[in-house]
Image (cartoon, grey):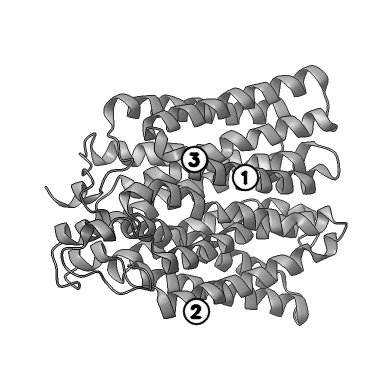
Amino acid sequence: MGGSAAPPAGSSNASSSRIPWAIITALSLGMLVYGVAESYGPVSAISGVLPSSLAFLAYSLPYVAGGFGALLAGWMADSMGRRNSFIATAALIVVGVALYLVYSLWAQMLGLLIASFVLVGMAAIGLESPILAMLAEAVPARWRGNLLVIVQNFGNLGVAITFIPFFLGLAGLMNTVAVTMLFMAPLAALIVALLAVRESLPWSAISGRAGMDVESAWREIDGGAEPVEPRGGLWLRLLLLVVLGISQDVGFVYITYGVAYSYFSQGVAEVVPIIGGLAMVIVGIVFGILFVERMRRKTLAVLSFGMQLALWMVLWAYRAVTGSTAGLILLAMMAMQFLPVELTWASRAVLEPELFPTHTRGRLISIVRAVVWITAGAITGVLTLVVPPFNVAAASVAAIFALSTMLAGVWWFEGFETGGRSLSGHDIQ
């Protein structure tokens, strides 16, 4: 796979240890774009490009649009292939950036800015579906969890880079940095994908385009890895991933942007995303390299979502007792949130592409992502529009994590393990 020639017959053991670097490079650039685009709306609110009365749109509209973009990209991933879906979706980002340039340089029409939010959100969040499907099908089972976490961690790097100009006292450059990266990164990803990335072998096999059966295709990728043994039913898997996804997205978007913007003192709203982005990059790299394949997927889900529940309760209690809206202690407590935020992200990163068969993987991932983004975008939009008392907002988010922790517990007893196992078990019955 990747940019190298297919291995000769009989070389499946060598193939199973090969990392497809061209694919990893293109998809990492795609996730970098995703992270910048995820910050695109909040940056416009924090930097004053969008009027304060419309700030709630920046915290909701890109993510709601992204849900519909995920549906489109997931359909393309299953019908056109993972590579072609990635290329088409990345190209749409350039169009969204062009609309912003027209808005900022020539026509100060709010409709153009909103259209840019919508298109960039649709395309960037839509990138997740082909990225997850391609990673699951191109990376050998022994490395799959590591790279699912590390590659998606480039999204956190995009968040941090976008907000660094504020940290350097150059807040006016925040939009410039975001727009530049939104233009350059997808172009680089497109070039790599066009020149060096080959289509997913399992998808090609199951769609009749590879000249081999799907079992042989998976053997080329995973060698003799033990196959997964699916159980628990499709509806339980969808419910699990939707609830975990909504919780994780609300926790990430709200703690990174909404809480500081709505409740805490000036300056915190710009510092928290930098702290969070860099903290998640570090945690993601360390966890992705050293720990993800040493833990059961079930253990990771219960642990990470349970930690989020506990820390939201602690943050609520601290704010209720002290009334503090500033200070190093508060920043430290908010920074602590990003450890379980990254771990919940890692849990989603490995579970979403591993629980579905190849012929529907793109669509089912996209259904999960669409429901998650639309629901999470609506929740964070309401919380930043209405701005309820902080104890109400924090209790609401804690309740969401209580539900997700409970469902992770259900999966512990009723689900199946996927770590280090070949996903061929979904396709070969």
Query: Marks 2 and 1, how far apart in space?
Result: 28 Å
- Residue 226, located in which quarter of the rendered image? top left
Position in image of residue 84 (x %, y %): 37, 73
Q: Where does the N terminus fall, quadrant-wise?
A: bottom left
| Mark 3 residue crowding within 10 angstroms, few (<14) / some (14–19) / many (20+) | few
Q: Is residue 389 visible?
A: no
Is disc 3 placed on a helix, strand or loop? helix
Image side of residue 297 versus residue 201, left or right: right
Amino acid bearing label 3: Leu
- Residue 301, located in which quarter of the rendered image? top left
Residue at which label 3 appears: 290
Residue at which label 2 appears: 191
Amino acid bearing label 1: Ile
What residue is rendered at 72% in x and 44% in y? 275
Which numbered tag is attached to residue 60? none
Nearer to me, 54 or 360: 360
Position in image of residue 400 (x %, y %): 52, 30
Query: Marks 3 and 2, how far apart in space?
Result: 31 Å
Q: Is residue 367 above or below residue 245?
A: below
Position in image of residue 361 (x %, y %): 30, 55
Disc 2 and disc 1 in contact, CB within 8 angstroms: no
| Mark 1 residue crowding within 10 angstroms, few (<14) / some (14–19) / many (20+) | some
